[in-house]
Image: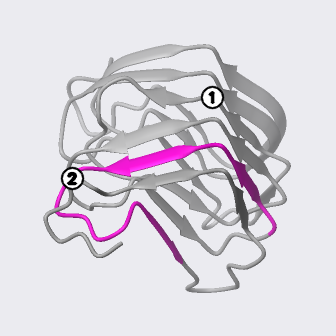
Amino acid sequence: LGTQGTYGFFITLDGFGSDFSIDNNVIEDALGTCIENTGWSYGSISYNNFNTFNNALTSAFSINGTGNGVMTGLVVVGNKTMAPATTHSFIGLMDNSYVAGNYISVTAAPAQSLFIRDSNDNKFVGNTWTSSTSATYAVLMEYSSTTCKRNKFFGDTFDDSGASSNTA
């Protein structure tokens, strides 16, 4: 899938929309981000398996409302990297959503397995975030243009034990 060219997405949801499901897929040989959502709300990205990442900037998913506004009511459950991704998954401008039971492993820089920016009131339950590079963090949260607060983590595993500069 997407082994040539510039992008190589499995699927991208661009613009505005709602009520979608991207569930129970096996995504292999991706050149770029496997699943991208840039503005759709009230949907599911669940039980997808990601395998064989083809370049240094291939991630399992990117949920990023930059340019299209805040996305709400998303369910991101049970996704798994079967082989380590080569860059972090991203959540930006996502509010009031549920992220549970995901296993995301990264083996190249940028180092963290999940990068969260400008997202609020999300619940993270029973996920595993693993980075085995020169990482300092398994998960990085920041705000840049708005707030990043009231995100709650319950029973998640954060593992950067393979990092040469481990400071956790």
Taking the image as drawn, is residue 59 in sight?
no
Distance between mark 1 and mark 2 Cα atoms: 23 Å
Where are the magenta residues, as a range?
121-141
- Residue 26 position in % (x across, y down): 47, 13
Residue 137, located in which quarter of the rendered image?
bottom left
Residue 139 locus on image (x, y percent)? 46, 63
**Which residue is pictured at 80% across the width and 52% down the height?**
97
Numbered badge on residue 78: 1
* Whether residue 106 is situated above or below residue 12 in the rendered picture: below
Q: Is residue 137 visible?
A: yes
Q: Quadrant of residue 47?
A: top right
| Badge 1 amino acid | Gly
Q: How many marks?
A: 2
Q: Which residue is mark 2?
A: 162
Asked whether 136 falls inside the magenta stretch, the response is yes
Q: Secondary structure at mark 1?
A: loop
User: Three-letter amino acid code at disc 2?
Assistant: Gly
Q: Secondary structure at mark 2?
A: loop
Q: Tell me the quarter of the image containing the N terminus.
A: top left
